[in-house]
Amino acid sequence: MRIALICPSRGRPERFKAMVESAMSLANDAGRMTAYLMTDLDDPERDNYLTSRWVVRYMNGTKGTSVPKMMNTLAQLTTDDILFAVSDDILFRTQGWDDMLCAAFERYPDRLLLAYTNDGLDRDKCTHFAVHRRWVELAGLYVWPEFEHFYADEWCYRIGSAIGRTIYLRGLVTEHMHFKYGKSKKDETYSTKRGNGISHRDAKRMEELMPMVNEIADRMRAAMVPT
């Protein structure tokens, strides 16, 4: 299976490069991996981002577009099998992570599951996750694009939970180098998205979307193959 790393980024060319290089260096077969990057036209660092055969870059022409909306757009532009939502502030820590991820999906002929990784705190929490293209086809989209910033992962997790198909890949570590864990400095990108009530508004949106979550789960249950 081919793997797409879905990653919007702003103001962090070095961190994006470190993420991609950690993924490449620890993959057993880096040739099946592509990083899909989206940056803003007004990003002052836009010309400093990594260019390589492992990176496909798109420019976002609308200032202020949310990360979930960019994630959804990137997913629509890919043709890969597994769509892995990563971020520019993680580092891959597990050798053979690509084999582990593919193996999770190969367990299910219908490919309908949500697989999520260990964020380095060794806790069962969905932050960075992967779904198969079949999931996106049935859901009609990758993540709900109208969140301001948060809850894209929770939206997918609730669908996976509703169909009984969530898998925590505890042995696959994508360490979240977030400032709130003391693993990086607080930069402008973090500051812009924290505060101003964004988290509370997205939490409200999440609850309002539960009827849609249940409808998508019904479609997926109808397409599931017994294992």
Image (cartoon, rainbow, N blue to C red):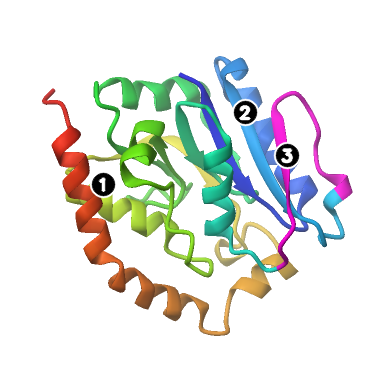
Residue 48 magenta-highlighted: yes
- Going from N to C along the chain, the mark reached first, 1 or 3, is 3
Most extreme residue toward the bottom, as rendered? Answer: 196
- Label 2 SS: strand
Q: Amino acid at mark 1?
A: Gly
Residue 102 image point, x, y percent: 40, 23
Crowd rating for badge 3 (residues with CA inside 10 Å; few <14, some 14–19, many 20+): some
Q: Relative to residue 81, is residue 192 depicted above or below?
A: below
Q: Amino acid at mark 3?
A: Arg
Q: Is residue 208 left or right of residue 180?
A: left
- Label 3 SS: strand
Write the start and end of the magenta stretch as one range. Answer: 47-63
Front residue of this view, candidates 111 and 196? 111
State the separation of the CA atoms marked 2 and 3: 10 Å
Crowd rating for badge 2 (residues with CA inside 10 Å; few <14, some 14–19, many 20+): many
Q: Is residue 83 left or right of residue 6?
A: left
* Label ID, residue 34: 2
- The quarter of the picture where residue 200 lies is bottom left
State the separation of the CA atoms marked 1 and 3: 29 Å
Q: Amino acid at mark 2?
A: Thr
Which quadrant: the C terminus?
A: top left
Residue 53 image point, x, y percent: 75, 23
Q: Nearer the viewer, mark 1 or mark 3?
A: 3
The residue under the point 58% across, 59% down is 67
Residue 185 image point, x, y percent: 71, 64
Which quadrant: the N terminus?
A: top left
- Label 1 SS: helix
Residue 36 image point, x, y percent: 64, 38
- The quarter of the picture where residue 110 lies is top left
Residue at the disc numbered 3: 57
* Label ID, residue 160: 1
* Label ID, residue 197: none
